[in-house]
Image (tube, rainbow, N blue to C red):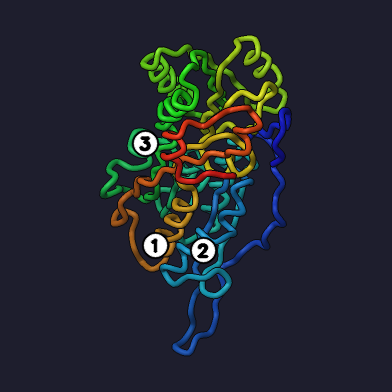
Amino acid sequence: MAVGNRRLVPMPPGKPRRPAKAPEAKPVAAIAPTGIKTWQTFAFLVVIAVLWHYLRGLTFRDGLKESAYVEGQNVAIQYRWADGDYDRLPALAADLVDRKPTVIATVGGTVSALAAKAATAAVPIVFISDQDPVKVGLVKNLNRPDGNATGVSQFTSELEAKRLALLRELIPSARRIAILVNPSYPDAETQVKQAQDAALGLGEELFVLKATNVGDFEPAFAKLTEHRADALLVAQRTCCVGSPDREPTIYQFRQYALAGGLMTYGTRLPDSYRQVGVYAGRIVGGAKPVDLPVVQSTRFELVINLKTARTLGLTIPPALLALADEVIE
């Protein structure tokens, strides 16, 4: 992801660079000293292809290893992704169910979890949800999930108010704040409502910008200039780095700050992927979703990019720097 004033990358329905496609995994058998050992099959429903490298990296596989499962040794994994196109999810979910996997793990947020839930009431599902799993119908109880699903609740959609407050702490004089949302994201209205309520309490004026496709960004940022915003809040499931007029901007995940964004506040993605691996491994080992409570994110991180701040001519208040979990020099 390149950073610059006009290099913008939307999530859906863009086409992030996809890694080489993994060979389609099949359940196979291997001879072990004690007899025949059947390899279990996982199925992954991945909405955002750019998140692929986390799944192929340390955190998910670390979670699997905690349950003594290693891909290519005693477990096979089938990968699917939707390139950010939510309309493809039902077909992908149905295809995975037809392959009779041992467990389906969804890491593309609530929309992919609901697609898997609609496709099967029998195959266990381990999800990452960015909305309340009870409210959206994934489970009826967090401590003892009913049915075939359990996973991680990230609270990402509930953090817009906190991000707005951090912007105010960064720029105490800010009075006009823009929020950039992806209107195709199912929770977009909730994001806006939370931010509006927070802005009202802070005495700020909030106006909404919308962008789904690459072509939507130029008109959105034209309005940003027109309204003379003091700062920008990029909501969950909306991906861009930088803005035409270089307004101070806060994003949700640490990866945006690493790519050059000014400031981020949100849950730790690697923790969620590791937990999905842990639960998937436990289900392969015989556990039932009903016995695995939904894990609620408790670790949140504030990351500040000082290099970007200097470029914007901003001085980060010492109190805000003291709160940061990571400062990028």
Q: Earlier in the sequence, mark 2 or mark 3?
A: 2
Specify few, some or many for label 2: CA neighbours under 10 Å numbering under 14, 14-19, or 20 or more: many
For image coordinates 51% across by 37% down, the residue present is: 264
Image location of residue 99, percent across then percent down: 55, 58
Q: Are marks 3 and 1 in contact (CB under 8 Å)?
A: no
Towards the viewer: 313 or 186: 313
Q: Nearer the viewer, residue 319 or 84?
A: 319
Q: Amino acid at mark 3?
A: Asp
Q: CA distance from mark 1 to mark 2?
A: 15 Å
Residue 144 lies, with reference to residue 164, above or below; the image says below
Q: Amino acid at mark 2?
A: Arg
- Mark 3: few/some/many CA within 10 Å (<14, 14-19, 20+): many
Labels 1, 2: front one:
2
The answer to whether residue 60 is visible is yes
Circle 1 SS class: helix
Q: Residue at x 56, y 17 (%)?
A: 230
Label 2 sits on residue: 61
